[in-house]
Image (tube, helix red, strand yellow):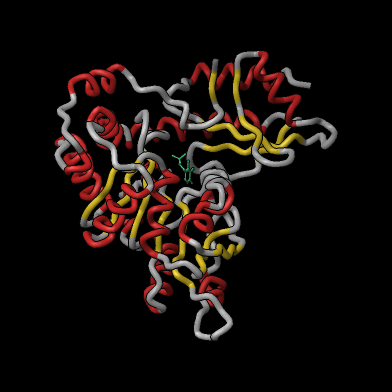
Amino acid sequence: MIDLRSDTVTKPDERMRKAMYEAEVGDDVYGEDPTVNRLEQRAAEILGKDAALFVTSGTQGNQIAGLVHCRPGQEVLLESQAHIFLYEGAAMSALAGVQLKTIEGIQGAMDPVEVEQAIRGKDIHEPETGLICLENTHNKAGGAVLSVEHMKAIYEIAQRHQIPVHLDGARLFNAQAATGIPVAEFAKYTDTVQVCLSKGLGAPVGSIIAGSHDFIAKARKWRKRLGGGLRQVGVLAAPALIALEENPSRLVQDHDMAKELADGIQQMTAFEVLNEVETNIILVKLTNEHQMTENLLSYLKGKGILAGGFGPGIIRFVTNNGISHEHIKETLTKLKKFQ
Ligand SMILES: *Cc1c(COP(=O)(O)O)cnc(C)c1O
């Protein structure tokens, strides 16, 4: 199967399996797992933050950030197509007791003026804005990169109003690969950041959240409350460490293949590529409105190619560690034959 549904489908390679087998472990709830400690220290250094915490998933990382930053009854500002808003089961409302206020962005970026206007809490009728969340790269906007300048503009507004900023950086390393700008440069303009190690970076499990010492101490407690305090979890930190240290540069290949696929698709009259392909995500629309995306997906599946539905009339291809140039060529050949 040529699996282009997501970059989460990557499987740990031999090096990672070996590292899992050989990992030095201890009880991480006691802070005694040396491999986890090494991973958290390296992650903090790479992201330019005081401290970091290994969490079970990107969702858990984002939710812990909400829980630490906010009090119940507050409001969180975020982009209208943010993963936290669309795909996390309303967890911030269910767990942190906050309501979400969305602002429609362009290529995933909210207008800083609109963000500032949306900040509230002085009037007795209003909830207080407790947090601003950004997403970089932006999944629903087709892996779009938020520029450092944009992040800085939002951060300056937030600081002026003393509101923390959290970055959902599930794919922040893709922003680094696309621009050559180090992840720490992006993370500089956010109080806390979550990065997924289990997407393009290829670890089997896990995300990192990073921030100040005080934030991480509180986050550690919330992780325990959520049942995310794991014991000899060095077996998972070991492949995560390889993902973090060795795989960021590999993402450039995913981006090259995504461009190759998008260029090929763009030349076919049956399809339209909706996004400017900056990273590893391609959003495709069928030009014939009577054609169903379900038909295309099942046709591709019959040819051994998996893609994902991504809203009405749209399908998503995501290049990843398991995809080669031959796979891209094969996918283009099969797409050409779709009627
Ligand atoms: C995948 C993803 C997450 C959540 O990660 P999980 O590990 O699947 O919980 C959060 N934000 C964005 C932008 C993502 O793409």
In the rendered image, the vertical position of residue 281 relative to residue 166, given as above or below: above
| Picture residue at 46% right of the left edge, 65% below the top | 132
Quadrant of residue 43 in the image? top left
**Side of 308 relative to 291 (left or right):** left
| Picture residue at 28% right of the left edge, 37% below the top | 230
Query: Where residue 131 appears, x then y in whole percent?
Result: 44, 66
Query: Where residue 50 appears, x then y in whole percent?
Result: 21, 57
In this view of the protein, which residue sits in the foreground, 274 or 101?
A: 101
Is residue 175 visible in this depiction of the protein? no
**Side of 114 relative to 221 (left or right):** right
**Side of 102 relative to 166 (left or right):** right
Query: Where residue 102 appears, x then y in whole percent?
Result: 59, 62
The outermost residue toward the right is 290
- Look at the image and tell me in which quarter the C terminus lies: top right
In this view of the protein, which residue sits in the foreground, 284 or 116?
A: 116
Is residue 311 visible in this depiction of the protein? yes
Quadrant of residue 160 in the image? bottom left
| Picture residue at 27% right of the left edge, 47% below the top | 53
